[in-house]
Image (cartoon, rainbow, N blue to C red):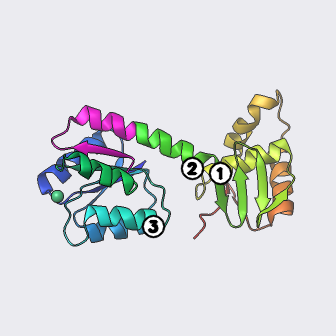
Amino acid sequence: MRLLIAEDDPMLGDGLRRALQRAGYTVDLAVTGEEAMAATRAQDYALILLDLGLPNISGMEALKALRGRRDPTPVIIVTARDRPEQKVEGLDAGADDYVVKPFDLDELLARIRAQIRRGEKRTSDALSAHGVGVDLAARTVTLEAEPVAVTAKEFKVLAALMRRMGQFVSKEELEGALYDDTAEIESNTIEVAIYGLRRKLGSGLIVTARGLGYTIPKDT
Ligand code: CA
C-alpha cells in the first residue's frame, strides 16, 4: 500500500517515512507542494499526509487542487497550525483528518489505518474502467452507462478483476472468489465466465496471460 508524505522538514519527513515503512507501507516523500501535486497525478495513493507549510505550492492549495479534480484519496493534514479556524479551513477544503504537530506516532498510525479503511469503503462500492461500471452494493454492471445482465459467477469474476485492476489474478484466485456459493467448481467455470464477460462487455476488457491468469488493464 503506497502512501505520500508531503513534508518539507527533512528530519520530520525522513522520520515519518521510516516509521511508515516499518509499519509496512510503501512511501513516497515530496518536499514541495509542486512535487506533491506531481506525485498525486502520477500515482494512486492509499493516503496522503499533508503538511500545510510547503514551499512553492502550499498544502492547502495542493489539497484544493486535488479535490478540484475529484480525486478522493484520503488526506490527513499534519501541521503545527493548531487554531480551531485553521482546522475548520483544512477540513472544509476536503481533508479527512487533521493532526497537530508534535503528534504521537502510534496515534497517527491508527488514524492512517482508519482513513485507509474508509477510503477503501468509499471506492469499493463502485468500480469503473474502459466504459464498464460495476456497482458492488447493487450488484449491477453497466457498459457505457447501459445496464448489462450478467450471471452471478460472471459478476464475481468481474468484481474480483476490477478490484485488482492492473494486476494479474490467477484462475485459482478467481475460483476462490466463487467458493462461497458453489460447493464444487467445474474445471472450466472460470473460462466460461470470462467468455461470457468478453461477449457482453467487449473482447478487449480482460487480458489473458499464460501462467499468470487474467487482468483488466489499468484505465489510462
Ligand atoms: Ca512545513
Q: Residue at 76%, 36% (x, y): give it.
A: 178
Residue that label 3 marks = 68
Query: Quadrant for ligand 1?
Result: bottom left
**Residue 110 counted in the magenta span:** yes
Amino acid on which the number 3 mark rests in the picture: Gly
Q: In the rendered view, does 39 fall on the left or right side of 107?
A: right
Q: Is residue 112 above or below residue 61?
A: above
Q: Nearer the viewer, residue 68 or 210?
A: 68
For label 3, count other residues whose C-alpha is less than 10 Å away and answer few (under 14), some (14-19) or many (20+). Answer: few
The residue pinned by badge 2 equals 123
Identify residue for label 1. 126
Q: Residues within 10 Å of mark 1 (few under 14, many from 20)?
A: some
Q: Is residue 67 left or right of residue 80?
A: right
Tell me which segment is drawn in magenta: 95-113
- Is residue 27 visible in the rendered image? The answer is no
Q: Quadrant of residue 185?
A: top right
| Outermost residue toward the front in this view | 85
* Horizontal arrangement in the rendering, residue 83 relative to residue 75 (left or right): left
Q: Are marks 2 and 1 in contact (CB under 8 Å)?
A: yes
Mark 1: secondary structure? strand
